[in-house]
Image (spheres, rainbow, N blue to C red):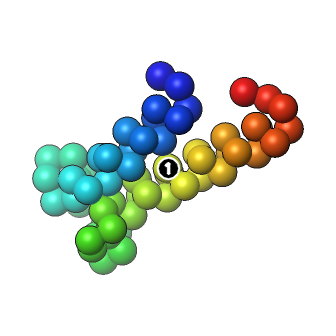
Amino acid sequence: MKTDELIEALRRLKVQTGSLACLGCGHEHNCGTGGCAIIREAADKLQAVAEFCERRGQK
């Protein structure tokens, strides 16, 4: 799976908060309508790393 595909998959998964995909991690108060806080943060960090690598000419 390519990095951009992984980021998109994480962003799609974030909206399943409260379903079986949600682990009830204790961060629920940060999820709300935006989806799982941990998955959102992981997608954001992964995207930042990918953008950094692209700027440096790496893949």
**Where residue 2 sits in the image (x, y, percent)?**
53, 25
Q: Which residue is drawn at 58% across and 45% down?
A: 46
**Where residue 47 sits in the image (x, y, percent)?**
59, 47
Residue furthest to the bottom? 29
**Where residue 45 sits in the image (x, y, percent)?**
59, 52
**Left-right relation of 53 to 10:** right
**Left-right relation of 37 to 35:** right
Neighbour class for label 1 at 10 Å: few (<14), some, many (≥20)? many
Task: From this view, report whether residue 6 is shown above or below residue 18.
Answer: above
Disc 1 target residue: 43
- Residue 25 seen in render: no
**Left-right relation of 27 to 54:** left
Q: In the rendered structure, which amino acid carries the disc numbered 1?
A: Ala
Q: Residue at x 16, y 60 (%)?
A: 18
The picture quadrant where one finds residue 27 is bottom left
Residue furthest to the top? 1
Q: In which quarter of the image is the C terminus?
A: top right
Task: From this view, report whether residue 31 is shown above or below residue 25.
Answer: below
Q: Which residue is drawn at 66% across and 51% down?
A: 48
**Where residue 39 sits in the image (x, y, percent)?**
40, 53
The picture quadrant where one finds residue 56 is top right
The picture quadrant where one finds residue 32 is bottom left
Q: Which residue is drawn at 33% across and 60% down?
A: 36
Task: From this view, report whether residue 34 is shown above or below residue 3.
Answer: below
